[in-house]
Amino acid sequence: MKAEIIAVGSELLTPDRIDTNSLFLTEELNKLGIEVLRKTIVGDHRELLAEAFRDALHRVPVVIASGGLGPTEDDLTRETVAELLGRRLQRNEAVVRAIEARFRSFKREMPAVNLRQAMVPEGAEVLENPRGTAPGLWLEDKGRMIALLPGPPRELKPLFLEQVLPRLGRHASRVRMMHRELRVTGLGESHVEERIKPIYTRYKNVNTTILAMPGEIQIHLRSWSEDAGEANATLDEIMRGMELALGDRIFAHSGVSLENIIAQLLIDNHATIAAAESCTGGLLAERLTRIPGSSNYFLGGAICYSNEMKTAWAEVPAEMIAAKGAVSSEVAIALAEGIRRRVRSTFGVGITGIAGPSGGSEEKPVGTVHVALASPNGTKERLVHLPGDREAIRFCATQIALDMVRLHYLYNGRPQPQR
Amino acid sequence: MKAEIIAVGSELLTPDRIDTNSLFLTEELNKLGIEVLRKTIVGDHRELLAEAFRDALHRVPVVIASGGLGPTEDDLTRETVAELLGRRLQRNEAVVRAIEARFRSFKREMPAVNLRQAMVPEGAEVLENPRGTAPGLWLEDKGRMIALLPGPPRELKPLFLEQVLPRLGRHASRVRMMHRELRVTGLGESHVEERIKPIYTRYKNVNTTILAMPGEIQIHLRSWSEDAGEANATLDEIMRGMELALGDRIFAHSGVSLENIIAQLLIDNHATIAAAESCTGGLLAERLTRIPGSSNYFLGGAICYSNEMKTAWAEVPAEMIAAKGAVSSEVAIALAEGIRRRVRSTFGVGITGIAGPSGGSEEKPVGTVHVALASPNGTKERLVHLPGDREAIRFCATQIALDMVRLHYLYNGRPQPQR
């Protein structure tokens, strides 16, 4: 079965706003085995809106629309679709009462304009929306299904899951989408592609997408099938192949961030961490503390931008900085060991480098970063030359630091392969 | 003049990728006075692609398409548009040579498939693309203009600016778009709306968009006119009204971040800053060091997650933490003054609070944050109750800290209005 998504709203045709609801809707439709054939973004304009719906209904049996259900004159989705299908709009008293109750709960009177939101096309089912005033609408017409949903994502998402999915499920075929995800760090996109291409190209029924982000590659596998068992077996076979091809470069088998993986490893091992950062300016600490409950493993961090602070907070000898330079293996190691000693944590991380755009030299160009990890087993240090802009360099440097913690546990004291 | 944008690529119909080129294209088209009527996203599918182009050319005189110009069988934009306009594809030797030269510069042979990218519809102009192998194409047909551009943003953007804009400019009307932006912090969306609605609703020819982000509201004004002088005068009049209505809540008159504003203030005043952060976990330091050249004003920061570190790094007396609690005015002030003293900076920031989702109590619910700013004029402290999730609470807390620096300079020692 095929579907189209129509996002309605003149603000979506400005440079300021993008329709992101369609990513969520696509994911959910795909799970039901429904493929999205086209996405259309139209303004609040009666004829153009009517044309978009008419064309979509001509092509596919399922149309999901978001937006244009508000109370003002601009909001035309309800009226346009009713007219297109030749249905009269009728005032629905249950909806009127729900909107009135919502306003009462804020201790306000319902403005008269909101009555427009209670107008329902003949034969449409009202999809209650406790999170906003605009209810959704479900229409069936000559074998086609139309869902009209409010635009705000926090209203649209639960409404779709609770009320649209079950209705679609009744009509959808038995085809379902199965999905697998791998996340990889420490390898570039072309190297990942090189290693896994011989695997995934052998499976014509599986769609493979490789997404490159700074410091991370995501691999998505999707298979549509009526036979979930067979499709899952195929996906698992590909996964095993990719695991062999990518080895210890895989850090997650689902859509989870590297900082989340490290947080779980630290909690599971009753370990703690501290960081002394220079060029990353607190980004490593910020990533480690994004996660609820981070006080269980994160004790503290020092952002030692000035040389003086490297000495004061992480006990890096001033003579070492003078002799070796602030961007050096020695200083990275001293930062890691110093912060670990000061904070009395299991791990200490030291990062020093040149994030750019200025500050580079021939000997130490922009992107030169030293990352050190001090642990009960001793200290490891890596020198990397990172590509990209300041933001990418800083992010990749923290990615390498987190990955060193992951490899520490993966190899558990055994020798690690060279990178 | 009106335009439509077509984004081509099956990957744009998955849950993983969104078309963002259209935001850039819309901005640039708008500047030329060209309004975007519709955005369509289609897969690499010959009939559906042909239908999308046919319909768009039926509605508008300008169609800008991105994607589908690659060398593989999937890439159908060139062939589809040529067929639709009844033009034969001819091999362009200059393009062949350019692609060959590009491969030679990487010390590689040109694969035969890349010859497809040298096929040019009769009468089309080739838009050279030094950043990739796929050249863009410009076609004019019965008064309509079509630009076919490669999908990668780093290729599309310069190609559009250098080669498409001048061609469109020759045909565009004399209408131009004028734009103004204001950025506001410390006021919620509905309060901003309440204050400025009486102003902007008086101007029917100006489009006003209010975008709410955590800790920040952006206001965009756009006016289309043949008479730039008159439109600018109107926009300036609205801006003066909004400046009166929003007063010191405006932190920028362009699309610039608060950390950039603070960086410039610190540099202009030869001042330095240090931070002792608890619940924000390094986010303030990270924002202050995102900016190139931040070592001119940022000396260091301490992330004092544990009480012990609050004492060790920012000299907060252990008895104070025991008596008042780590989340208290007293500790925020002690953090700010302690870090300022330790780092010997002009400003010291202290942040302590409960970012959630757990850790809240009846007395100090999630979102309770104390922010203190120590300066040569003494120390100010604010207690705020921030809404939203962990991420929003952390971001807003750093926004408040940065805003306190801004207000310090704005009032320059004079009493500040209560918030």
Image: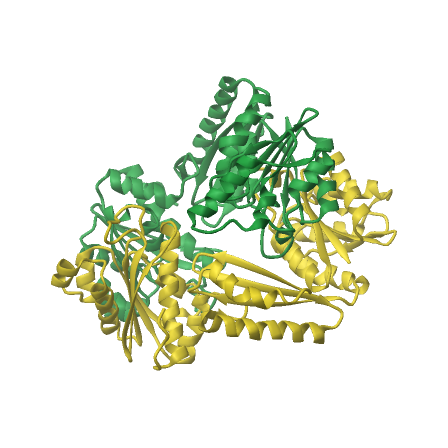
Chain colours: A green, B yellow
* Residue B172 location, quadrant: bottom right
Residue A406, compared with residue B353, is above or below; it is above
Q: How many marks?
A: 0
As drawn, the residue found furthest toward the left would be B319
Q: Position of residue A223 (x, y in %)?
A: 55, 26
Residue at coordinates 37% horizontally, 74% vertically from top-left?
Answer: B417
B109 or B72, nearer to the observer: B72
Q: Position of residue A299 (x, y in %)?
A: 23, 53
Q: Is residue A140 left or right of residue A178?
A: right
Residue at coordinates 39% horizontally, 49% vertically from top-left?
Answer: A399
* Residue A8 location, quadrant: top right
Whether residue A144 appears in this view of the structure is yes
Q: Position of residue B319 (x, y in %)?
A: 11, 62
B407 or A85, nearer to the observer: A85
Whether residue A360 appears in this view of the structure is no
Image quarter of the C terminus of chain B: bottom left
Q: Is residue B172 left or right of residue A271?
A: right
Q: Position of residue B222 (x, y in %)?
A: 64, 64
B153 or B60, nearer to the observer: B60
Q: Is residue B177 left or right of residue A230?
A: right
Residue B29, compared with residue B381, is above or below; it is above
Image quarter of the N terminus of chain B: bottom right
Residue at coordinates 47% horizontally, 70% vertically from top-left?
Answer: B251
